[in-house]
Image (cartoon, rainbow, N blue to C red):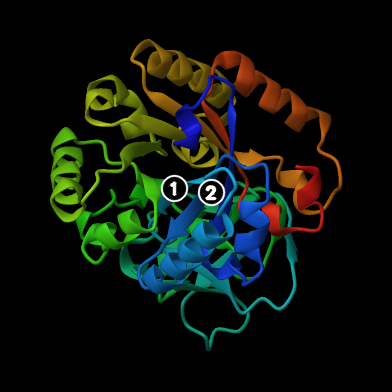
Amino acid sequence: MGLISGRQTKIVWSFKSKALTKDLPKSIAESAADAVRLVYTPGSDDKLLNFLKDVREYEQGRSRISAMLDITPQARAKLIGLEEPKELRHGEQIFLSVNPEKATHLKIEAEDWQNLFTIGSKVFFGYGNVVLTVEEIKNEVTTCRVLQGGTAYPRMEIHVPSTRKPPSLNHLTDLNINEFSRVGVDYVVLPGFSESREIEFIRRRILKASDELPWIILKIDNKGVYEKLEGLLPLVDGVMISRRELALTLEPASIPMITKEVVQLCNNHAKLVLIASEILGSMRYNPTPTRAEVSDIANCVMDGADAVVLSEDICRGIYSKRL
């Protein structure tokens, strides 16, 4: 497997299923990437399987690229109705609604509107682009005040950490892990399960369904997983630190030190550790990274991370050859 050959920090390219194109397998096979992370959502099985088969075909005679399947639950809510970015100012009062008839409000789609908000809860557009606090919930309208201004974009995800549900085992019910193993999926990334019995159940299920057990990577994406990590490490082969998600449930300023702590803990226990979230994110639009991004990667390497996970989709952008 690419992540464990040698000691140098490896590079993982990330793609959501919607970003997979016909010419991408060839680009990946010819790239300098050590692994590819594919974000799995229910219903994307066939697309991901066919994509990985194409990658394996183009690899003939080249170094094999490890494949990583990230089982990521979809966001509970998204902004809809915006045709262009909208600036929101600090202190501004705004209204969120699932009712399309309330045209003066920011419309959202939500899988569980009744339980999405509570009075006083913080609401994040994206992962902190805009931060709101809930002031009132009444008649299909949630009234919020802007705590941190910024830009809201069409289809932007909405996160409410205080009402977030823990990941469900049902999310894995339809996943045909044996088929993915056959096309060379080496790692399965689990969402932030914080109970050992849940991870043990998943491991047994994967072992039963798969001819060859892929390595189990636990995503550290919330405070609960971080606080219980030492007890969970014996059940997994490694972790992925999702810094932008961690910052929703922990003080953002604490994330750099927490990252260093987790890397050291994993190294002490001989577990893989991957660092993710906005690695070289500015290269979606720019040919060179920022000084802060270069410093970020240098810290990951010096701290002892086994791999850095590049931000989603930047590897199919116009500057991908510079990565």
Residue at (68%, 27%) from the top-left corner?
297
Q: Please, is residue 161 above or below residue 108 in the view? A: above
Which quadrant of the rendered structure holds the C terminus?
A: top right
Can you give x and y, in whole percent of width and height, for residue 68 in the image?
A: 44, 47
For marks 1 and 2, the one nearer the N-term is 2
Give, as a three-letter code, the residue at label 2.
Val
Q: Secondary structure at mark 1?
A: strand
Q: Quote the CA–CA distance across marks 1 and 2.
A: 6 Å
Q: In percent of the image, x 33 and y 68: which residue is there?
A: 112
x and y percent of residue 87 in the render?
A: 75, 61
Mark 1 — residue? 68
Q: Are marks 1 and 2 in contact (CB under 8 Å)?
A: yes
Which residue was labeled with disc 2?
Answer: 36
Towards the viewer: 9 or 278: 9
* Relative side of 22 to 230, left or right: right
Q: Please state which amino acid type lies under the numbered disc 1.
A: Met
Instruction: Estimate the x, y position of residue 1 in percent, counting from the top left.
Output: 44, 36
Mark number displayed over residue 238: none
* Crowd around label 2: few <14 · some 14–19 · many ≥20 (10 Å): many
Does residue 310 appear in the picture of this structure?
yes
